[in-house]
Image (spheres, rainbow, N blue to C red):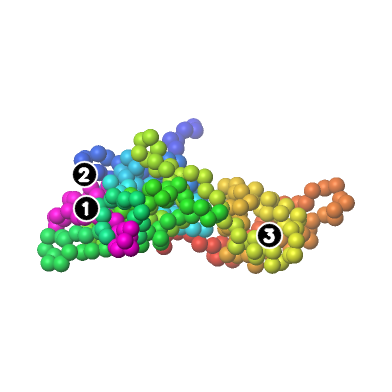
Amino acid sequence: MTQNLPEKSEKEMVYAMENGDEIRLTADMVRQFLVQGESAYVTASELMYFMHECKARRLNPFLRQCWLIKYSRTDPAQIVEAIHHKRSKARKAPDCNGWEKGLILLDKKGEIKKSKGLVLDGETVLGAYFIAKPGSWEIPYELEINLSGYIKKKKGGEVTSFWSKENQPSQIMKVVESQGLSALWGDTVGNTSIPEELPAPIDFTLDKNGMYETEPHELDTSEFDKLAMDRTDSPDPAFDKYLEEMAAAQEPKMSVDQFKIESTAQFEELWAHFENWRKDKPPAAGKSEPKPPTSVFDPWNEKVWRNLRKSGFP
């Protein structure tokens, strides 16, 4: 007699929040609902790392206390935490007596001054500062950072809306606050980043619920394009066709620009594969379309190619 056995459920990670709420996470749940960017690019190890970090820090990702970001197959995923949650955890540290943050400005007279956030006409934001004195410390901890190192720009050189001039004072203060809290109370607060600290020029906006959303961002393919132009003096239609086929063959499917960016580091291998592809291409007068690249030459399936590609957390 045949029995219908129940499907094996995915293993859950279960933990309790400080208020007693029970959180249940699975890898599939994280991939579907808690990733910003390209969820298909997130590796199993990155999913597991994220779940363990949530459990260790008692983070509730469903309340957007933290989330996972990944936009490239080759770059590592980033765990991002909301600044308000880092503040909440820092206040619970036994030796936390509060902290101070503010702006470092250049005033009209050319003198440097500090401000709690107000920027007057004619003043320039140079950076931000953080000061705190844990209970047993005799000397306060002080941190200062430059604004210029955090402003993100798009491919064309214009500043992202997230780092627009009017947003810069509040954004840079959140950056220095996050770094100061992690430096002093890392065991309690953790060392996760906030969106303002991310190195990539991802453009965030706040939705009506106060959650971060990403705006479409341009992809910089200039490095790849330069390498391609070094191989040929003029645009090569065959290479364009090859890139279209290769991008469409990826799982998940990529745009040509995405494929270019992820192939830049292995351009020599890619070009060798292209030359093999071109040799197998039928003559121009032929009626049949070129055959798509086979797995024998496909660099995405080659063991050596896989070993060259980066993945996982740093």
Residue 89 within the magenta-colored segment of the rendering:
yes
Percent position (x, y) of residue 138? 12, 67
Residue 9 figure quarter:
top left
**First in sequence: mark 3 or mark 2?**
2
Q: Which numbered tag is attached to residue 296?
A: 3
- For residue 67, above or below residue 190: above
Q: Which numbered tag is attached to residue 202?
A: none
**Three-letter residue code for mark 1:** Ala
Q: Nearer the viewer, mark 3 or mark 1?
A: 1
Q: Nearer the viewer, mark 3 or mark 2?
A: 2
Indicate left or right for 232 with 303 as reference. right
Indicate left or right for 94 with 236 as reference. left
> Which residue corresponds to mark 1?
90
> Which residue corresponds to mark 2?
18
Percent position (x, y) of residue 89? 23, 50
The magenta segment is 85-112
**Three-letter residue code for mark 3:** Val
**Three-letter residue code for mark 2:** Glu
